[in-house]
Amino acid sequence: MSAHGSPYPLLPSMAEVSGYASARRIAWVLVFFFVILVVALGFTPWQQSIGGSGRAIALAPLERQQTISAPVDGRVVRWHVAEGTRVKQGDVVVDVSDNDPGMIERLRGELTDARDRQESLGDRIAGLEASRESALAAAESRVGMAAERISAAERGLEAAEATLLAARLNLERQEQLIKRGLTATRNVELGRMDNDRAAAEVERARNTLNAARKDHDATTADRQKVEADYRALVEDANAARSSASGAVRPIETRLARQSTQEIRAPRDGVILRLLAQPGSEMLKAGEPLAVLVPDTTQTVVELWINGNDMPLLHIGDQVRLQFEGWPAIQFVGWPSVAVGTFGGTVKLLDATDDGSGRFRILVAPDASDEAWPEARYLRQGVRANGWVLLQQVKLGFELWRRFNGFPPTTTKTTEPVTGGANKKK
């Protein structure tokens, strides 16, 4: 029997592992610290976020990549730029020529004819205006003469009526005298003749006055007719001149387009691609000639978000961005310890998806955070990953949420509480 009371002798290998009791104590200590670590991590704050990917673009649509198109059918004569050339607004980019070399001359001839017709119609209108003034002056003169004849006829009627009154009184007086035997019958007959002659004169004067009035009405109507006729002629001439002016404008537009042999840069920027070969390639109006990348005054990031996460986003939400080619160490749950990421805020949420269930958001730089990389690093099209920051929760809750497939917690809202001062609910 061995010294330890065991019926079997103590082997040398067993003697080497005889300290297994201390190893058990170390294992229990490690398990204890592991449990403490798990519990502590369960109560550690965790930043919920929604991830998306996209690229850097210009905020203004006019500053995004655009094409320079051919204004007319033709061919490229000569390029003034190469790929990568920086241009200013108004710099000549390319010379083009029309397929029909005689088009410009024909358009100039059509324009000259249209302008000549327009000038002739203007002269005609001026002549009609002068003729109208003369005709109206003559008509006014005739109306004035008719008015004078009316006045003369009225005075003649007054004189004839006065003569008739005198003849009637004389006839009555002679008739009284003949009854008394104080006058001769001849005098009565002469008085009756004078009375009849005066009555005839009154009737003639009245007819003359009526004729003068009718003549005045006729001359007035003639003046109105002259004015209406000339007005119609002038309006027709004006309409013809307007039609001629309308024919001039399209010809001028076509001539301006055909005369555009030099195509200039619409904005400051860099020529990205040349899409047409000089001399050999025939182009149609509207076909792209070159691709221009304008200079960007404000850069934003275009992120694409899953439709399940879109209801959780709001304008002004904080975003952390990681740009492609920029060294960074990202901790999604602890953005405060991340290195090489940049802050931003949600500036725009699209009203509809892209056709595949994804929604676009635009992220602008956060003025209170570190400035984004310079333009020579952050060019249009640089890929970026982004995380929209939501509410901060415990890590244990986040794991439980993920295991159960629940959505992230939305941001709390503030509502007034009735019955007292407003408080955050």
Image (tube, helix red, strand yellow):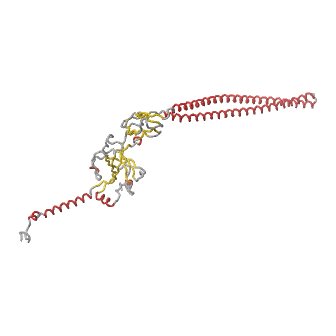
Residue 368 place in picture, x, y as percent: 32, 45
Give the total number of marks visible in the rendering. Answer: 0
Q: Nearer the viewer, residue 421 or 213?
A: 213
**Which residue is painted at 34% across and 60% down in the image?**
405
Residue 26 in the figure: left or right of residue 234: left
Given the current orientation, which residue lies at the most extreme right position?
A: 181
- Along the line of sight, the residue nearer the viewer: 400 or 209: 400
Residue 397 sits in which quadrant?
bottom left
Check the picture and name the quadrant holding the N terminus: bottom left
Q: Nearer the viewer, residue 196 or 385?
A: 385
Q: What percent of the width, then of the height, locates residue 396?
A: 28, 59
Query: From the viewer's perspective, is residue 42 above or below residue 291?
Result: below
Residue 132 rendering spot, x and y as whole percentages? 65, 30
The residue at the far front in this view is 280
Q: Quadrant of residue 182?
A: top right
Q: The C terminus appears in which quarter of the rendering?
A: bottom left
User: Residue 275's quadrant in the figure?
Assistant: top left
Q: Is residue 382 above or below residue 199?
A: below
Residue drawn at 32 percent across, 40 percent down:
376
Question: Residue at the spot x=39%, y=52% of the render?
Answer: 358
Image location (x, y in percent) of residue 28: 18, 62
The answer to whether 18 is drawn above or below residue 147 in the figure is below
